[in-house]
Image (spheres, helix red, strand yellow):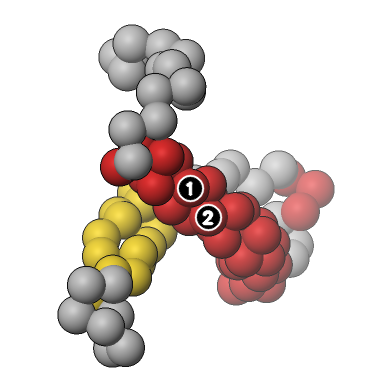
């Protein structure tokens, strides 16, 4: 999964910025023998629809929290501490 977050200047004001997120998800599956009679296109279409619906729910929440976190950080609010080291 790749999620690229960037910003652009808002049309209304030269100081306002808008967050933009572009997400790419690649899923590889092995189709069980019992489902091999179903055309691959139908399985792919169903999977794509499920992932799109999940992203429609998750991404706006993620971006909203990211904006809140940024505003808190930009104002010097140090009440939130990292939960980890940032290393994998």
User: Could you tell me which secondary element the residue under label 2 belongs to?
Assistant: helix
User: Could you tell me which secondary element the residue under label 1 belongs to?
Assistant: helix
Residue 13, label in figure: none
Question: In the displayed image of the protein, which residue is found farthest to the top?
Answer: 85
Q: Quadrant of the C terminus?
A: top left
Circles 2, 1 touching at the beta carbon (< 8 Å) = yes
Look at 42% across and 40% down and name the residue there: 72
Q: Position of residue 62 (x, y in %)?
A: 53, 49
Q: How many marks?
A: 2
Q: Position of residue 48 (x, y in %)?
A: 59, 66
Q: Is residue 81 above or below residue 66?
A: above
Q: Is residue 84 left or right of residue 57?
A: left
Q: Is residue 48 visible?
A: yes
Look at 22% across and 72% down and name the residue there: 15
Residue 68, label in figure: 1
Task: Please name which of the two marks, 2 or 1, marks the residue nearer to the observer.
Answer: 1
Q: Position of residue 28 (x, y in %)?
A: 49, 46
Q: Is residue 13 left or right of residue 36?
A: left
Residue 64, label in figure: 2
Q: Is residue 43 visible?
A: no
Sort mark 2 into few (<14), some (14-19) or many (20+) by Cα contacts within 10 Å. Answer: few
């Amino acid at each position: 999964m790749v999620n690229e977050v960037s910003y652009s200047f808002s049309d209304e004001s030269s100081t306002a910025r808008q967050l933009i997120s572009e997400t790419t998800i690649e899923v590889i599956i092995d189709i069980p023998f019992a489902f091999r009679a179903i055309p691959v296109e139908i399985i792919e279409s169903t999977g794509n629809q499920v992932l799109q619906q999940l992203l429609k729910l998750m991404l706006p929440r993620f971006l909203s929290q990211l904006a809140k976190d940024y505003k808190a950080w930009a104002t010097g609010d140090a009440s939130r501490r990292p939960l980890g080291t940032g290393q994998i």
